[in-house]
Image (cartoon, grey):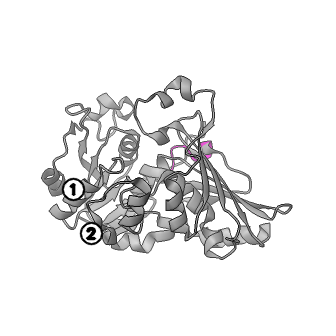
Amino acid sequence: MQDINGQSVNVSIIGASGYTGAELLRLLSLHPLANIVAVTSRQFKGKVVKEVFPHLSKMKFENLTFENYEKEKIAEKSDVVFLCLPHKTAYPIVKELYETKKELKIIDFSADFRFKSWEIYEKTYRVNHTAKELFGKVAYGLPEINRNEIKRKNIIANPGCYPTSVILGLYPAKSAGLIDTSFPIIADSKSGATGAGRKSTLDFTFCEVNESLRAYAMEGHRHAPEIAEKLELRSVRFTPHLVPMNRGILSTIYFSTKSSREELIEIYKKYYKNEYFIRLKENPPKTSDVTGTNFCDIYVTKDENTGLGIVISVIDNIGKGASGQAIQNMNIICGFPENLGLDFPGNWI
């Protein structure tokens, strides 16, 4: 693998026909140093990219053919592999790719390696993990809080979309000790339908989603332990909602604090002053502000009547919440500028 002054990196995408795979293809078509050498899909084996995704016609990878996954072939021809697979199906592939080629850079979209220990993963996802020995070789791929470790590791666990919005929204206040943790922290998050993946189930048909808003996983969502672990909190009251839009996440986060609004704002400015993909806002941001981008827009304030700090954090769930962040991680581990291939405005309307 070459650095920024050398040749492009060879990239493969496993599970490339879902929403995150399609977004990776779109974003990597804009990346000057990424050369996609393989895309896999059981459903669309033998079809070319532009047949499955007409919006990618005339892009540089339009004639790439979807193929079956073969570990030796993928490992041999790739410098970086993106795994766009659900939990439980990803860790066996991560394990066999790692054992086939130790120097391979693997960026895993699933939840299979997001926790510090396999015990917490098994408790949260109720799955017997058979690649336990790899947990010490994995970095949690949220660059704004974990950049140095990402640089050192070959396996990157791409964060969940909800956790990305909530962790980035709370991290400066938590790291500065401004949150009174004797009171509950509440994260109310709303996501577009792409967050559920590209699958055909009744709950995500047009008539079930359109003109409706609903909360789900009220008794506990699997992303709550991920948020709590990365923020070093005992627990977070996290409530997800499905909203009738394609993409985007808006998280409204409440926490008890003795700091003033001005103090909170200064802490956020100080912490994020050198972070390209964090944009601090003077007014509450909208999901449309970040659609199609890798940006996270954050607004922080305080309700003096209740003593609650309030943060609004918005991301594109398949941008900064998935594929965009994965490319940001690729840039870090390859020694590229962090915003390479990601430096463009959103789709506003």
Q: Around disc 1, counting alpha carbons within 10 Å, would you say few (fewer than 14), some (14 to 19), or many (20 or more)?
A: many
Give the answer, above or below, for where 194 lies relative to 165.
above
Q: Which type of secondary structure does the marked residue at label 1 adopt?
A: loop
- The mark total stands at 2
Q: Residue at x 75, y 69 (%)?
A: 257
Magenta residues, as a range?
Answer: 288-293
- Percent x, y of residue 149: 40, 73
Name the front one of labels 1 and 2. Answer: 2
Specify the principal SS of the magenta part: loop
Disc 2 target residue: 133
Q: Residue at x 14, y 51 (%)?
A: 73
- Percent x, y of residue 106: 29, 59
Question: Which residue reaches farthest right?
Answer: 305
Q: Amino acid at mark 1?
A: Ser
Image position of 259 (left or right of 144): right
Numbered circle sitting on residue 78: 1
Residue 273 appears anywhere in the view: no
Quarter assignment of residue 151: bottom left
Question: Which residue reaches farthest bottom?
Answer: 177
- Percent x, y of residue 76: 14, 56
